C-alpha cells in the first residue's frame, strides 16, 4: 500500500473511531456533553478526508512504487485498543490524586424541595455547602447523593463523584465520608445514598485542603452507573 493510501486509511479509521465513541455514548467517559458535537464533526471531517479522491481510499491512488514502511501500521494499534478495550470512566484509582477543593459563595440559594423524603443534590452542591456555608443550610436536612464507593483509610468508604470542566484530563474528585452503612461496598460500586450531614465548623476561606464532609447514611441503594458519569462545572455549554 502506498504512503498516501496508508495515511488516508489512518485518517478514516481515526475519524470513524471518534464517530463511534459519540454514537455509543462512550465519549461521555472522556468529555463533557457539550463537546460531543465538536468531536462528531471532527470525526466526520477525518472520515471524509480519508475517503475523498484523489489520494483518499475512494481515489485511484498512487502508482504503487512508493510504499509505506510497515512500522506505519503500528499507528493503528492505539485505535484498535480503544475500540476493543474501551477505557471506563474515572474511578477510585484516580480519586486520591485528583481531589477537588471547592470555594465558597457569598450567599447560597434555598435548597430544592424534598423528593421521596430527601433533597436531591449534586455532590458539588453538598460538598460546597458542607465546607463553606456559614449559614449551615444542610443542618438537619436529609439529602440524596449519587456517587461510587472508594475504600477509606481506617475502614468504611467514601462516596466519590468526579467533576470536570472540559474532559477527563482535568477531572477532580468530590469526596464525602459515609458513616452508618454496615454493608461492605465494593470499590467503584455506584450508590444512591440518603443521609444527614455530620455537623462541624465551616472550613476557613484560606484552608486549601479541608477534610471531606461526613454523611450519616439512613438509606443506601446500589444503582447502575449513571450516564453521564461526571458532574460538570458551570459553563455556557452545559
Image (cartoon, helix red, strand yellow):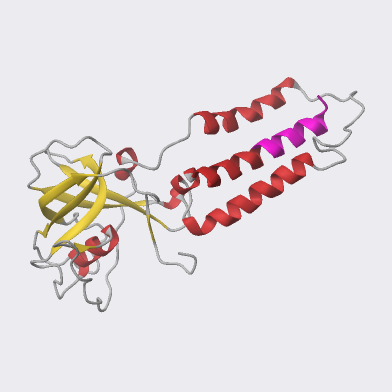
Residue beneath the point at 58% across and 29% down:
80
Asked whether 97 or 186 is in front, the reply is 186
Question: In this rendering, would 188 be left or right of 29?
Answer: left
Picture coordinates of residue 79 (x, y %)?
59, 33
Give above or below for 238 relative to 62: below
Estimate the x, y position of residue 48 in percent, counting from the top left: 74, 45
- Toward the right, the furthest residue is 63
Q: Residue 161: image x %, image y %?
A: 30, 51
- Name the residue nearer the viewer: 169 or 141: 141
- Where is the N terminus found, in terms of image quarters? top right
Q: Quadrant of the C terminus?
A: bottom left
Residue located at (65% from left, 30% from top): 75
How many marks the image carries: the answer is 0
Query: In the rendered structure, which segment of residues is drawn in magenta?
Result: 1-13
Tell me, yes or no, whether the highlighted magenta stretch contains residue 3.
yes
Give the residue at the far top of this rendering.
Answer: 70
Report x, y in % for residue 2. 83, 27
Q: Name the dominant secondary structure of the magenta segment.
A: helix
Q: Residue at x 44, y 45 (%)?
A: 29
Q: Is residue 204 left or right of residue 20?
A: left
Name the quadrant containing residue 125: bottom left
Relative to 153, say whether 193 is above or below.
below
Q: Residue furthest front?
A: 116
Above-or-below relation of 61 to 147? above
User: Which residue is found at the position 33% from the left and 41% from the top?
Assistant: 91
Q: Any magenta on residue 78?
A: no
Amino acid at each position: 500500500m502506498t504512503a498516501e493510501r496508508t495515511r488516508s486509511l489512518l485518517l478514516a479509521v481515526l475519524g470513524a473511531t471518534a464517530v463511534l465513541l459519540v454514537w455509543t455514548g462512550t465519549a461521555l467517559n472522556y468529555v463533557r456533553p457539550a463537546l460531543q458535537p465538536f468531536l462528531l464533526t471532527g470525526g466526520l471531517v477525518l472520515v471524509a478526508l480519508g475517503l475523498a479522491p484523489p489520494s483518499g481510499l475512494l481515489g485511484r491512488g498512487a502508482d504503487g512504487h512508493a510504499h509505506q514502511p510497515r512500522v506505519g501500521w503500528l499507528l493503528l494499534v492505539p485505535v484498535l485498543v480503544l475500540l476493543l478495550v474501551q477505557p471506563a470512566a474515572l474511578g477510585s484509582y484516580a480519586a486520591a490524586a485528583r481531589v477537588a477543593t471547592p470555594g465558597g459563595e457569598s450567599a447560597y440559594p434555598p435548597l430544592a424541595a424534598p423528593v421521596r423524603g430527601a433533597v436531591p443534590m449534586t455532590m458539588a452542591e453538598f460538598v460546597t455547602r458542607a465546607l463553606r456555608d456559614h449559614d449551615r443550610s444542610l443542618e438537619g436536612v436529609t439529602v440524596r447523593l449519587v456517587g461510587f464507593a472508594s475504600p477509606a483509610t481506617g475502614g468504611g468508604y467514601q462516596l466519590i463523584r468526579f467533576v470536570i470542566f472540559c474532559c477527563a484530563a482535568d477531572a477532580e474528585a468530590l469526596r464525602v465520608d459515609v458513616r452508618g452503612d454496615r454493608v461492605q461496598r465494593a470499590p467503584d460500586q455506584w450508590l444512591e445514598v440518603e443521609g444527614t450531614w455530620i455537623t462541624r465548623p465551616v472550613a476557613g476561606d484560606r484552608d486549601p485542603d479541608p477534610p471531606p464532609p461526613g454523611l450519616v447514611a439512613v438509606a443506601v441503594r446500589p444503582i447502575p452507573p449513571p450516564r453521564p458519569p461526571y458532574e460538570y462545572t458551570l459553563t455556557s455549554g452545559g
